[in-house]
Amino acid sequence: MTQSYSCEDGRTIAATYIGNDSDTPTVRLAIGEGELVLPQAPSGSGARYQADVAGQTYQWLTKADQGTLIVAQSNDPASAKEQITSCTAM
């Protein structure tokens, strides 16, 4: 299943959810020219996908029709320097 999201920073993210009925669900995020594949991680509410890529930690959080992309330095994921982008399903 693919869902498009319109983000507050003007970008569009296409999220393709893969293997939700398996032991290893993932999401493929198409962001501009780039693509990320993130495995699902434990979440208290909604869904969370996370991976470290090239020194950065990427998280994609979803609940209802909202998505949030969080990017932080891998060595300091709780850093005040993290970038948070809120998105809404289209």
Image (spheres, grey):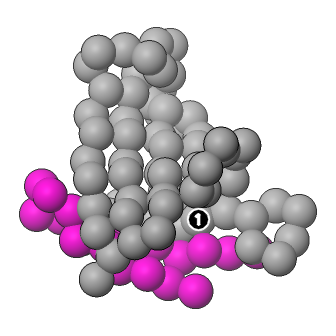
- 67 or 55: nearer the eye? 67
From the top left corner, tell me how far across and down residue 43 is, in percent: 66, 44
Please identify the residue farthest to the right as the structure is shown.
23
From the top left corner, tell me how far across and down residue 36 is, in percent: 49, 57
From the image, tell me which residue sits under label 1.
Answer: 27
Is residue 70 covered in magenta? no
Give the side of residue 51 with respect to residue 34, left or right.
right
Please identify the residue farthest to the bottom as the structure is shown.
1
- Location of the C terminus by quadrant is bottom left
Q: Main secondary structure of the magenta part?
A: strand
What is the secondary structure assignment of the residue under circle 1?
strand
For the point 37% across and 36% down, the residue is: 71
For the point 50% across and 84% down, the residue is: 2
Give the residue type at disc 1: Val
Residue 38 visible from this viewpoint: no
Residue 78: quadrant of the picture: top left
From the top left corner, tell me how far across and down residue 73 is, in percent: 41, 22
- Location of the N terminus by quadrant is bottom right
Q: Residues within 10 Å of mark 1 (few under 14, many from 20)?
A: many
- Residue 79 lies, with reference to residue 27, above or below; the image says above
Is residue 13 covered in magenta? yes
Give the side of residue 40 with respect to residue 53, left or right.
right
Which span is picked out in magenta?
Answer: 1-19
For the point 28% across and 61% down, the residue is: 87
Total number of numbered discs in the rendering:
1
- Residue 18 lies, with reference to residue 58, above or below; the image says below
Residue 61 visible from this viewpoint: yes
Give the side of residue 9 with respect to residue 36, left or right.
left
